[in-house]
Amino acid sequence: MDGEHRLARPSEAPTGPAGQDHRCETRHPRNATRSRAAAGAVRSRAAVAAARCGRLAAVSPPRREAAGQDGGMARVTSRRTVLRVDTAAGTGQRRPDTLVAEEPLEIRVGRAPLAVTMRTPGHDLDLALGFLLTEGVIGAADDVRTAQLCAGTDAPNTYNVADVVLSAGVPAPLTDPTRNFYTTSSCGVCGKASIDAVRTRSRYPVDADDVRVEARVLTGLPDVLRQAQRTFEATGGLHAAGLFTVDGRLVVAREDVGRHNAVDKVVGWAVREHRLPLAGHVLVVSGRASFELVQKAWMAGVPILAAVSAPSSLAVELAEEAGLTVAGFVRGTSMNVYTRADRISVPG
């Protein structure tokens, strides 16, 4: 399975001591029905299916009656009535609009809270695993004993807690104030107390990766990624990250309200699939190339990062240090290559 998870509805960020108020499901209950008196509707409660990928136990929460988007991904959208104003026509009309969902996900390691990130529900175990890898907590799938979503106290369950148990011998992450953090959809490193807490070094060197990609292939990848953004079509409010081969084949794509979350979901998929390091691949992101996205690419062993918008100065500095290729403004038939341009085959 590819790690898709269906969440029931939004909830507040989980509270209470680790291991309390949220039950981690690892069994296979039978299908059952649950009525919600407040809504006056009957929802089917799908089985909590435990599926093993290597040594990782993935748990799928209940499915909504209405199929989600992105191949049945979680509850990624909601509907709301808005006032549509047209100043040219001088009109105002109420109509339904589709919004992208944003909910908190608490990431725990061995039931100890580590971080809370604001994300679009779906592929939550991939998000947790990718986050842990890009933060240097784990380095490969073998570092993880189990990864599971935990049931909340709401009915139906929200499954807004992911708990990862590390393998024997893997040190637990630091939980002092310099490493505890809260991440938002726009900031992936908010709350870290020092530059040292932000910067993490990869176990996968990318500077020696001699992969090459044709410029015409690279400039066409954002359009391929855009076509895979089915939820963006409905909301216009999601970032995307896609992993490609150098000949332009899309390997996996993920959407999220946070650009860093979208990358973590791609990296987490690679963790589950035992595909690290991602040597010889291209990571394409739909927004700008920030410092944290370069770092995440480096941590996963990706040699080339392409963005449709500009990179930051710190992102370029880190890419230069790592030996990672960064291309920005990858649109239409042109782009700017900021580092390691030798990996880009330019015609003529």
Image: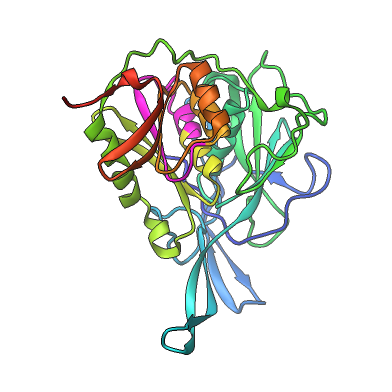
Q: Position of residue 140 (x, y in %)?
A: 53, 20
Quarter in which the C terminus is drawn: top left
Asked if residue 305 is among those painted magenta in the image, a careful observer would answer no
Q: Position of residue 196 (x, y in %)?
A: 72, 22
Position of 282 compared to 295: left or right?
left
Instruction: Kindly identify the residue that appears in the image at 48 percent across and 87 percent down.
Output: 93
What residue occupies the far top of the structure in this picture? Answer: 208
Q: Is residue 274 left or right of residue 120?
A: left
Q: On screen, 260 above or below 210? A: below
Q: How many marks?
A: 0
The reply to whether the magenta stretch includes residue 286 is yes
Q: Tell me which segment is drawn in magenta.
A: 267-289
- Using the image as rendered, state which of residue 339 and residue 164 is in the foreground: 339
Kindly tell me whether residue 248 is visible in this rendering.
Answer: no
The N terminus - image quarter: top left
> Image quarter for residue 169?
top right
* Residue 80 visible in this rendered orientation of the protein: yes
Pick the residue in front: 21 or 27: 21
In the figure, is residue 94 to the left or right of 244?
A: right
Seen from the viewer's position, the closer of residues 207 and 235 is 207
Q: Which percent across, then down, holds residue 220? A: 26, 41
Taking the spot 29% from the left edge, 34% from the top edge, the residue there is 218
